[in-house]
Amino acid sequence: MDRGTVVPELQRAIDAEGRALLQRFNLLKPLVERMVTSEAIAQVAVSEEQLEQARLVLLQLRGFDGIDQWAELLEQLARSEQQVLEGLRHGIRRRSLMRERFAAKAEARFLERKNELDQVVYSLLRLENSFLARELYLQIESGESNFADLAKRYAEGPERNTNGIVGPVSLTQAHPTLVEKLRVAQPGVLLEPFRISDWWLVVRLERYEPATFTDEVSDQMCREMFDAWIDEETATNMSELESETTEQAPTSGFSDFSISR
């Protein structure tokens, strides 16, 4: 796709004043992004088999049993058949180009991001009182009490509502100090209380789930790279539009008058 090819189309369709209004309400960038995407996928072919499968998936997602209920689906969506089919074609073209352009790079991206994609499940007690944290740690360690009961009774964070269980979540979502401890922890082994900011934490790693390169993960990597590419193309077009608007901006003595006021 040539850079900036969306700009001439926008210039023909919407004058500078209209584009300024779209920009004011943060609508210009989404419009440019949609146009960039549509242009990128325009030449991707869609087979009747792909379209039929997409129709069946949409029906299933909406709770319908089969293709014979297509008319009911259209009524529920309050859209014409042409609109719905065009939306399905757009999705098929986008996924096809995404795979065609980036599938060969997906595994390399996965390996770069693997540490971010690994997930953990852990039990957590978050407390302000260090003495209480130590006491509860000893109760769990000795088997006198279980983590879930103590979390419901004493935890001072949202884990109180989940029996102390957090996850599965990406390691990157946790505080760096907690991440460091979870990376070297053994599942089922209770960690001694440690402090993060104003909190004392009692933690036990329940399960470590290393990310694997599945078809689903491959699609995720392709989608991330495709989105980054579209963002870059959108930024290029937005920059050209802004330059064009600046060049065409009228000058008058009112500028100095406005500043002086």
Image (cartoon, grey):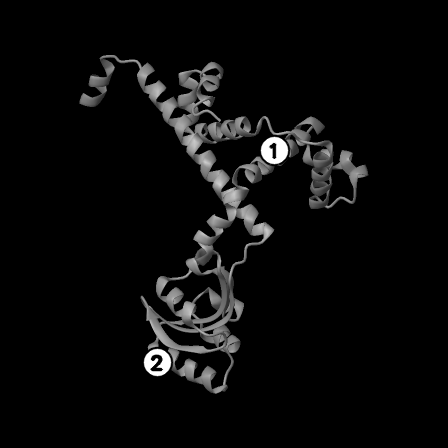
Q: Is residue 162 above or below residue 5?
A: below
Q: Are marks 1 and 2 in contact (CB under 8 Å)?
A: no
Can residue 26 be seen by looking at this rendering?
A: no
Task: Work out whether mark 1 precedes mark 2 in sequence or the reverse, and give the earlier one.
Answer: 1
Q: Amino acid at mark 1?
A: Arg
* Image point (25%, 12%), residue name: 252
Q: Is residue 253 above or below residue 177?
A: above
Q: Classify mark 1: residues with Cα within 10 Å, few (<14), some (14-19) or many (20+).
A: many
Q: Is residue 40 above or below residue 227?
A: above
Percent coordinates x, y for residue 20 in the rendering: 39, 22
* Image point (33%, 71%), residue name: 195
Q: Amino acid at mark 2?
A: Phe
Q: Residue 8's quadrant in the figure? A: top left
Q: Is residue 248 above or below residue 42?
A: above
In the displayed structure image, the side of residue 161 where residue 180 appears, left or right: left
Percent coordinates x, y for residue 70 in the rendering: 76, 36
Is 8 or 2 nearer to us in this picture?
Answer: 2
Numbered mark located on residue 131 in the image: 2
Percent coordinates x, y for residue 260 in the rendering: 18, 21
Q: Which residue is mark 1?
A: 93
Element assignment for label 1? helix
Is 232 or 246 nearer to us in this picture?
Answer: 232
